[in-house]
Image (spheres, rainbow, N blue to C red):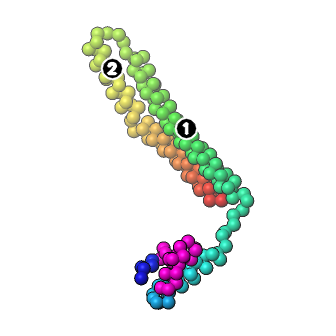
Amino acid sequence: MKNFNDDMLNRYLDNELSNEDKNSLQSSFENNPEIKKRYDALLITHNLLKNVQPDLTSIDFSKMVMQKISKRRIIEFQQKRFLFSVLSLFLIIIVGILGYVFYEIISTIQLSDSSKTISVYSNLVGNYFSVFFGKKNLSILGSVLSLIMLISGYFLYDYQKHSKKNFSH
């Protein structure tokens, strides 16, 4: 007597067995109630699955999916462009500040011997930074940068909210 597994029983249901295997399996149904139970369970499952109707999609399903993907790409591009713009603004501000500092330092340096120039240069840099980053100027600079960060954070949040809303619809 052969050992019949579920794969062989499924092939029997699909009519994929040789005549010899079919006959052997049919005789096993009569002699072995365990194999008959497994076959009956598979037959019920097979019939249920055969009667299941597939879900139908709309004609425009592919088009709608592609439009959502396209919208998502556009929104991601806009977010990247916005972030690049904000970072560029910060970079321009930093370059402007550094340029102004160097301009002030260079315009106040008088030509003299090198050791005197270095000490004057280092004193001017130290004095300028202590004045520029003093309590009053530092609080103004911090307030401006905080305001810029809050505004950019709001716009980034708004872009994110719209992208999730547009992607889910």
Taking the image as drawn, is residue 81 in sight? yes
Query: Residue 161's image quarter?
Result: bottom right
Q: Position of residue 146 (x, y in %)?
A: 48, 44
- Image: magenta residue range: 6-28
Residue identifier under label 2: 121
Amino acid type of the residue that numbered disc 1 sits on in the rendered structure: Ser
Where is residue 21? Give x, y as percent.
50, 77
Q: Nearer the viewer, residue 141 or 9?
A: 9
Q: What residue appears at the point 50 percent right and 38 percent down from the top-left corner?
A: 87
Is label 2 in a helix, a strand or a loop?
Answer: helix
Q: Is residue 68 placed above or below 143 in the rendered structure?
A: below
Q: For the point 45% across and 88% down, which residue is it?
A: 32
**How many marks can you see?**
2
* Mark 1 residue crowding within 10 angstroms, few (<14) / some (14–19) / many (20+): few
Q: Residue 85: which disc?
A: 1
Q: Residues within 10 Å of mark 2 (few under 14, many from 20)?
A: some
Q: Is residue 46 above or below residue 154?
A: below
Q: Pick the residue in front: 138 or 39.
A: 39
| Label located before the other in sequence (2 or 1) | 1
Instruction: Identify which amino acid the numbered label 2 is placed on.
Output: Tyr
Nearer to me, 97 or 129: 97
Farthest residue in the right direction? 59
Asked if 81 appears above or below 96 in the picture, the reply is below
Q: Could you tell me if residue 140 is visible in this image?
A: no
